[in-house]
């Protein structure tokens, strides 16, 4: 996103769309070699064609790819970079993934290293970095040598007035587990189905919300599945649930976990990416080691099923953390502070 100063000034947004990849095609070899290279070159052409001479006062960029694509602009205009990961972290996630092959790991190391070099050059021109997790912030400082004073952790803001908890004090006939996420296999959906089928199906009910075609067939006959839920209807499913389970294999900071916390649910999630920043083991749920077994997951979930006081306590703590970290007011205050700081600095120069 690119924009002028906040407030009464004009704001211009420039988002990447599917149409852009048709309007500004890149050679086939770039698409095959690297998704990052493809995005950078498409957005570079779009920005040069549509925005380069608009006279912006301030630029907000979302994602390290745009910091590369917009380097000609950021040399001239104060820029803020919002990001959920870095190339170094992306490589770590791929290396760690149980699905990665040796070839995938080698390719990731080579391309990730080249992208990191690219980013180091682009990052020189960024005034402030707004990583959405401490996990990402640490990488900027450790892997890219960014001054810590330029790095401000800014968790995503969500509407806490909308994402309100329901009353969990009444005991339900069957405890309800909830999973929400597309890219079903990467998000750990298959793993969760095995846990449920082998260890939990007689003690609780499972609801899965995903657009993936994988959630079809006999395997899901005892599971409630939904593929087309309007966003404004999702809260009903969170409110009907008791425990949010998210065994993702590769992620940054999933919004569904933030929504579950705001809705007052105890969360059981895999320790990967920025998830440890928001799921505190024993406080608002359980943080599962990356290679934990089905039996270990089942044991934690059964604990929450059999101990309603603990389950409710953890759900209440989830809401407390959401109010502390994810409010729109806090998010807007951070953005306003960065903008005011940059505007004042540029005025003084």
Image (cartoon, rainbow, N blue to C red):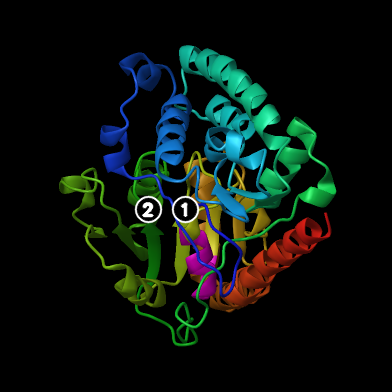
Left or right of 325 in this view: 265:
left
Residue 181 is tagged as 2
Residue 310 visible within the image: no
Marks 2 and 1 in Cβ contact (< 8 Å): yes
**Vertical order, 290 against 288 (above or below):** above
List the residue tagged with mark 1.
246
Q: Nearer the viewer, residue 121 or 112?
A: 121
Graded by Cα atoms within 10 Å as few (under 14), some (14 to 19) or many (20 or more), the crowding at tag 2 reads: many
Q: Where in the figure is residue 293, as x and y percent of width and height?
A: 52, 40
**Vertical order, 78 against 102 (above or below):** below
Residue 122 visible within the image: yes
Give the residue at x 23% y 48%. Answer: 215
Give the residue at x 63% y 19%. Answer: 113
**What whole-number distance in Å separates the C-alpha atoms at marks 2 and 1?**
9 Å
Q: Where in the figure is residue 254, as x and y percent of width and height?
A: 50, 53
Left or right of 32 in this view: 305:
right
Residue 111 is tagged as none
The disc, 2 or 1, on the residue closer to the chain's N-terminal end is 2
Give the residue at x 39% y 18%. Answer: 30
Of helix, strand and loop, which mostly describes the magenta segment? helix
Could you say which quadrant of the image residue 286 lies in? bottom right
**Which stretch appears magenta?**
256-266
Q: State the quadrant of the C terminus.
A: bottom right
Q: Where in the figure is residue 344, as x and y percent of width and height?
A: 78, 64
Graded by Cα atoms within 10 Å as few (under 14), some (14 to 19) or many (20 or more), the crowding at tag 1 reads: many
Give the residue at x 71% y 51%. Answer: 134
Is 264 inside the magenta-drawn segment? Answer: yes
């Amino acid at each position: 996103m690119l924009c002028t100063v906040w407030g009464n000034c004009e704001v211009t947004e420039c988002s990447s769309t599917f149409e852009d990849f048709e309007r500004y095609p890149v050679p086939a070899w770039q698409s095959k070699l690297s998704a990052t290279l493809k995005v950078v070159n498409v957005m570079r052409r779009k920005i040069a064609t549509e925005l380069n001479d608009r006279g912006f006062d301030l630029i907000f960029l979302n994602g390290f790819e745009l910091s590369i694509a917009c380097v000609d602009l950021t040399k001239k205009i104060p820029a803020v970079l919002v990001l959920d990961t870095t190339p170094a972290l992306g490589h770590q996630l791929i290396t760690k993934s149980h699905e990665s092959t040796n070839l995938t790991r080698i390719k990731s190391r080579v391309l990730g290293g080249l992208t990191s070099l690219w980013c180091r050059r682009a990052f020189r021109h960024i005034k402030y970095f707004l990583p959405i997790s401490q996990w990402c912030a640490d990488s900027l400082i450790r892997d890219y040598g960014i001054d810590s004073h330029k790095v401000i952790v800014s968790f995503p803001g969500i509407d806490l007035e909308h994402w309100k908890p329901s009353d969990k004090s009444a005991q339900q006939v069957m405890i309800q587990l909830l999973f929400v996420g597309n890219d079903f296999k990467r998000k750990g959906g298959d793993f969760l189905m095995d846990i449920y089928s082998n260890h939990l199906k007689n003690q609780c009910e499972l609801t899965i919300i995903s657009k993936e075609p994988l959630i079809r067939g006999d395997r899901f006959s005892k599971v409630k599945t939904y593929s087309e839920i309007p966003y404004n209807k999702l809260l009903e499913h969170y409110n009907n649930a008791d425990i949010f389970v998210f065994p993702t294999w590769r992620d940054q900071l999933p919004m569904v976990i933030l929504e579950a916390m705001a809705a007052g649910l105890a969360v059981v999630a895999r320790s990967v990416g920025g998830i440890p920043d928001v799921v505190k083991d024993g406080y608002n749920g359980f943080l599962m080691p990356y290679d934990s077994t089905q039996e270990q997951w089942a044991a934690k979930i059964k604990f929450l099923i059999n101990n309603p006081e603990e389950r409710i306590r953890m759900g209440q703590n989830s809401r407390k953390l959401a109010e502390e970290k994810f409010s729109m007011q806090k998010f807007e205050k951070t953005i306003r502070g960065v903008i005011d700081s940059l505007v004042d600095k540029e005025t003084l120069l």
